[in-house]
Amino acid sequence: MKIIYILLLLLISVSAYANAGKQADEANSAVSLNTDPAVISNEVNNGKLPYFTKDNKGNPVVCWTEEDSLGEIHFFFAVSEDKGKTFTLLRSIPVPENIKVHNESMPKVAFKGNGAVWAFFQTQEPGGHYASNVRYLFSKDGGKSWSGSRFISADSTTGKSRSFFDVATLPDGEIGVVWLDKKMEGQEDGRPVFFAKTKGFGMDQPVVVDKQACECCRTDIISDGKGKIHIAYRNLEEGNIRDMAYVVSEDGGQTFSTPVKVSNDQWKIDGCPHSGPALGSGKEMHAVWYTGKEGEKGVYYTSEFYKNRTKSKRLVSENRTAAHPQLCVIKNDEAITVWDELVEQGDSSFRRIKYRVFGGEDEGTVSLSNEGHNASFPVVLSLGENSALIAWYESAGEKSRVIFKKVDLN
């Protein structure tokens, strides 16, 4: 399979900043970004944390954060109506000042079946460094106006921690949310995994997915074309074994299956590695994750864990510093996996973005980011038959920016 890189020409509305301390205003003009790689964030600010989804019409959507010179965080999303060639609709989301951005718990948007836009994010709450909550806003008019922020759970007790969430539009048009909740009564280690979905313009009662998971690794949720809801997370077993777990719901999120291991790595670590799994759905279920087990450290891929099938895993990169993997599924059940890894050149070092395709003709790993720039936390979105969008953030000097590329597989 020949891999061709196609520069993603992005047309986005420009955010015009009245001054560094104010929320960005939305401009009516559009600017063509025709450099390689393409940049969507405002280069005056520090752009970070891209995330992909699709709207209710199937259009690609990207969101990201920007930090201005006064340390204020701004949150944006943009929509493409031409299959990722251009992004011409930019909206700012009025998040509160106590928004807390985290690479493993980044702000995200999702679209209900009726077109309503929901924005989810983590906030710093009173009670110490780890006191946090997950909140949401919604817009009924495509992001022109927004509701006030609300807690994801009716229990808004301060001093506790709710975080490391993920979201997905469900087959019934609602939005499913998974997160790590506060410790349950009497719980010493780990945190429970909760799931809830939208109900009208609020949230339904949460369901306990697992009572004990690793405290600080991101969760992942997707839905498939068969109406099922799939969730993966890093489990916490006796003896501080922290391997990836997977559950599925076949009744719209009312109940979930007994957790099964994505891979029996038996990684024992007294602490949280801050690296969660990613799932993809096609003819098979696909998963990618990081393990630090001695002698097996690295990022791995598998499609052989669903319904307790025999588990096998493939090393994604020979570079054992690879981390933060994500994936999406395209034609013929092929999975595009992306990650970042450390490169050492003489006295200098940097992290770069790479990708690899599983399920078709394997041409090995392919580099994407600029040499010498620190690039981290890639995300990837399928555009359908044979292409995908890949985004990440990178820095060269004092500023960071959000970068895009489009990859076509022929």
Image: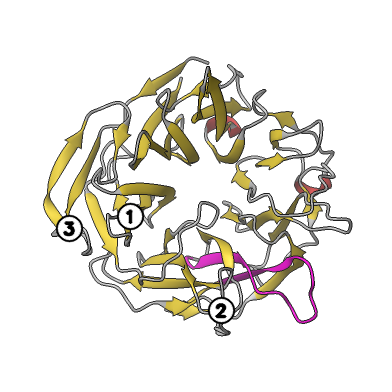
Name the mark on residue 299.
none
Pointer 2 local density, CA inside 10 Å: few below 14, some 14–19, many at least 20: few
| Residue 59 in view of the camera | no
Q: Is residue 224 above or below residue 311?
A: below
x then y, percent, for residue 37: 33, 29
Q: Residue at x 37, y 52 (%)?
A: 64
Q: Does the stretch in magenta take in 178?
A: yes
Identify residue for label 1: 67
Q: Is residue 316 above or below residue 135?
A: above
Are the residues tagged 1 and 2 within 8 Å (C-beta)? no
Identify residue for label 3: 26
CA–CA distance in space, label 3 to label 1: 17 Å
If you read the primary sequence from the N terminus, does the residue marked by circle 3 or circle 1 appear first? Answer: 3
Pointer 3 local density, CA inside 10 Å: few below 14, some 14–19, many at least 20: some
Query: 18 or 234, which is in the foreground?
Result: 18
Q: Residue at x 58, y 52 (%)?
A: 224
Name the mark on residue 127.
2
If you read the primary sequence from the N terminus, does the residue marked by circle 3 or circle 2 appear first? Answer: 3
Pointer 1 local density, CA inside 10 Å: few below 14, some 14–19, many at least 20: many
x then y, percent, for residue 4: 41, 19
Query: 205 or 132, which is in the foreground?
Result: 132
The boundaries of the magenta stretch are 173-196
Q: Residue at x 60, y 58 (%)?
A: 227
Q: How many marks?
A: 3
Element type at mark 1: strand
Q: Amino acid at mark 1?
A: Glu
Q: Is residue 70 above or below residue 136?
A: above
Q: Does the stretch in magenta take in 53?
A: no
Q: Amino acid at mark 3?
A: Glu
CA–CA distance in space, label 3 to label 2: 36 Å
